[in-house]
Image: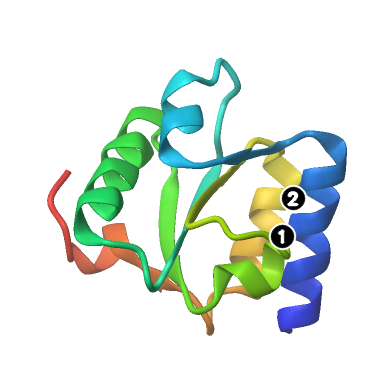
Amino acid sequence: MITKIAAYINFAIRKGDCVFGTDKLALTDKAVYIILVCNTTGESTVKKAVKLANKFDCDIYRVDGLGEYTHRATKVIGISDKELARAIQIQGTEVFINLRRLNQIDG
């Protein structure tokens, strides 16, 4: 399952449909369909990411070892390809923690 998720994320990276970091997400003109946050990310960055998820009206998930999927030292990514985002979401339902659904953090 993890290899499928990594493959989908890497497809998005190669297509140019992956936005890295909260600062770039805040500035992007693209629609973002899913945001992934590393489980080691600090609370202030997570809060920024949740606000961005509210802005884009997309799901946001906390992921164990996001760097394993992206092969980069990044803590937050956004996927701007609708189909790849949906595929990542389907494959990650058992692995990811949905921050919006748990109401873990108020945006």
- Label 2: how many Cα within 10 Å (few below 14, some 14–19, many 20+): many
Q: Secondary structure at mark 1?
A: helix
- The three-letter amino acid code for the residue at tag 2 is Leu
**Residue 45 in picture, x, y percent from top left:** 29, 50
**50 on left or right of 75:** left
Is residue 73 depicted above or below 1 in this figure? above
**Residue located at (74% from left, 57% from top):** 9
User: Disc 1 vs disc 2: Cβ atoms closer than 8 Å?
Assistant: yes
Numbered circle sitting on residue 65: none
Q: Secondary structure at mark 2?
A: helix
**29 on left or right of 53:** right
**Residue located at (37% from left, 72% from top):** 40
Q: Quadrant of residue 46?
A: bottom left
- Label 1: how many Cα within 10 Å (few below 14, some 14–19, many 20+): some
In the displayed orientation, state which residue is furthest to the front.
73
- The three-letter amino acid code for the residue at tag 1 is Ala
Q: Give the Cα separation between the discs numbered 1 and 2.
A: 5 Å
Q: Quadrant of residue 38?
A: bottom left
**Residue located at (79% from left, 34% from top):** 16
**Residue 53 in picture, x, y percent from top left:** 37, 41
Q: Which residue is mark 1?
A: 87
Q: Which residue is mark 2?
A: 84
| Quadrant holding the C terminus | top left
